[in-house]
Amino acid sequence: MRRTDGNNNIVQLYGVSFSPNTRDFTIVMQYAENGSLRKYLQCHFSSLDWPAKINLAIQITRGLEFIHLEHIAHRDLHSKNLR
């Protein structure tokens, strides 16, 4: 696990727990009040002007740049996983 704090474009991962009984993992992450990017865009895309859409793209790019510079692999990047 790598620390990602200090970057507002990354949802924080607080910890991971493993249950030996059920063999399930539990991931504890920062609460994303607005939900996923996909959900947000489904509700608001038509009302966003171009500067707002460009700002979203810039924020995503900055988050990706941060995880790449930290050598963090996401492996499942799509709009449902962007918060």
Image: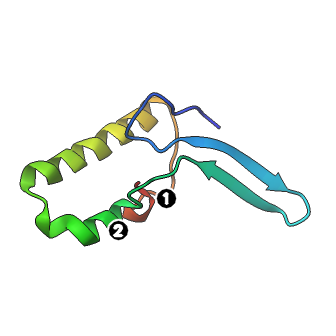
The quarter of the image holding the C terminus is bottom left
As drawn, the label of residue 76 is 1
**Frontmost residue, 61 versus 39:** 39
At x 71%, y 47%, the residue is: 16
Amino acid at the residue labelled 1: Asp
Q: Quadrant of residue 80?
A: bottom left
The quarter of the image holding the N terminus is top right
SS at badge 2 = helix
Horizontal relation, residue 60 to residue 58: left or right: right
**Frontmost residue, 23 versus 29:** 29
SS at badge 1 = loop
Amino acid at the residue labelled 2: Lys
Q: Residue furthest front?
A: 33
Label 2 and label 1: CA atoms lie apart by 17 Å
**Frontmost residue, 44 versus 60:** 44
Residue 56 at what x, y percent from top left? 23, 49
Q: Earlier in the sequence, mark 2 or mark 1?
A: 2
As drawn, the label of residue 32 is none
Residue 29 at what x, y percent from top left? 58, 48
Residue count near mark 1 (Cα–Cα under 10 Å), binned few <14, some 14–19, many ≥20: few
At x 18%, y 66%, the residue is: 45
Horizontal relation, residue 44 to residue 6: left or right: left
Residue 54 at what x, y percent from top left? 15, 48
